[in-house]
Image (cartoon, grey):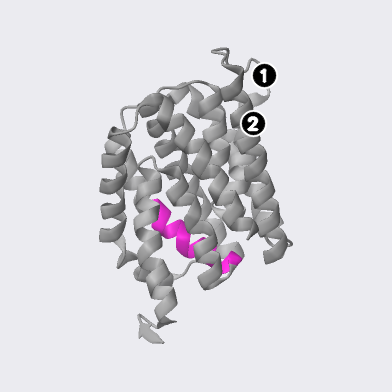
Amino acid sequence: MTDLLGVSLSQTQWVILLLVAILSGMGKAGIYGAGMISVPLMAFAFGSKDSTGILLTLLIFADVFAVMIYRRDANWSMLRQLLPTAFVGVLIGTYAGAVIDDVSFQRIMAIVILVCVALMLWQELRKSSVVPAWRGFAPGMGVTGGFTTMVGNLGGPVLALYLLAMRVPKREFLGTAAWFFLTINLLKVPFHVVVWETIDWQSFLLTLLFLPLVGLGIYLGVVLVKRINEVLFRRFVIAMTFVSALVLLA
């Protein structure tokens, strides 16, 4: 065990934090499967609920980097539809997180992700450019995204489903996602501090040590995203989301 800033960590926990810092940056730069894999890794190292606070801090650092890169590419019309209902989902998730045990949490999140993958595949196989016209589609995705990101930092697949269904271009996808998660993740902090008590000054200062690795992950993600065309990008998002669900079920 190594004691730093009053926090005792095992060698395994240090290694996982190093890896997750890089993966978090890559995920925010557009390699969404990388960010999703961080969830089960952190749950393994720190426990499902306790890990959410530590991971959230890393994700906020990555969100800031992502917004700096894609700040001009967001679709603000979509964000105005998603964010209010996403906050409702955060409130629901705050309550639910207090009554869902670790095993149930992992199984529920895996099922949610697999349903999202099935819907993404259905959208791809339809070969249609028609976007969903149902009035409740955006609010429903907002609530679901807010809930899943609160209870497990797992809102990525839900937002990916919405943006893929709306047929947004790659950079608009990344810019909208960057602003969405920076906003929602900042709104989640008070609930983690006051209600769940999964973030404190010690955990915050600890994650600050990994900020350079988050930046490295962002750089690697940006380089990889530039090498992926639109069609491959969509397929990559679907494939890596499916992998993350399997990891949670393992």
Percent x, y for residue 197? 56, 68
Left or right: 187, with 219 as reference point: right
Q: Give the overall secondary structure of the magenta segment.
A: helix
Q: Is 105 on the left or on the right of 164, as rendered?
A: right
Q: Identify the magenta region.
A: 48-60
Label 1: few (<14), some (14–19) or many (≥20) C-alpha neighbours in 10 Å: few
Name the one closer to the observer, 217 or 54.
217
Q: Which residue is mark 2?
A: 119
> Is residue 70 visible in the rendered structure shown here?
yes
Image height of 129 relative to 80, above or below: above
Q: Which mark is residue 135?
A: 1
Q: Residue at x 69, y 56 (%)?
A: 107
| CA neighbours of label 2 inside 10 A, class few (<14), some (14 to 19), many (20+) | some
177 vs 51: above or below: above
Looking at the rendered structure, the kind of residue marked 2 is Leu
Q: Quadrant of the C terminus?
A: bottom right
Quarter assignment of residue 19:
bottom left
Mark count: 2
**Front label number (1 vs 2):** 2
Q: In the image shown, does 83 or 218 lie closer to the viewer?
A: 218
Q: Position of residue 45 (x, y in %)?
A: 51, 72
Q: Are marks 1 and 2 in contact (CB under 8 Å)?
A: no
Does the image show residue 80? no
Task: Provide residue 62's location: percent of width, then percent of height.
Answer: 35, 50
| Vertical comparison of 38 with 164: above or below | below
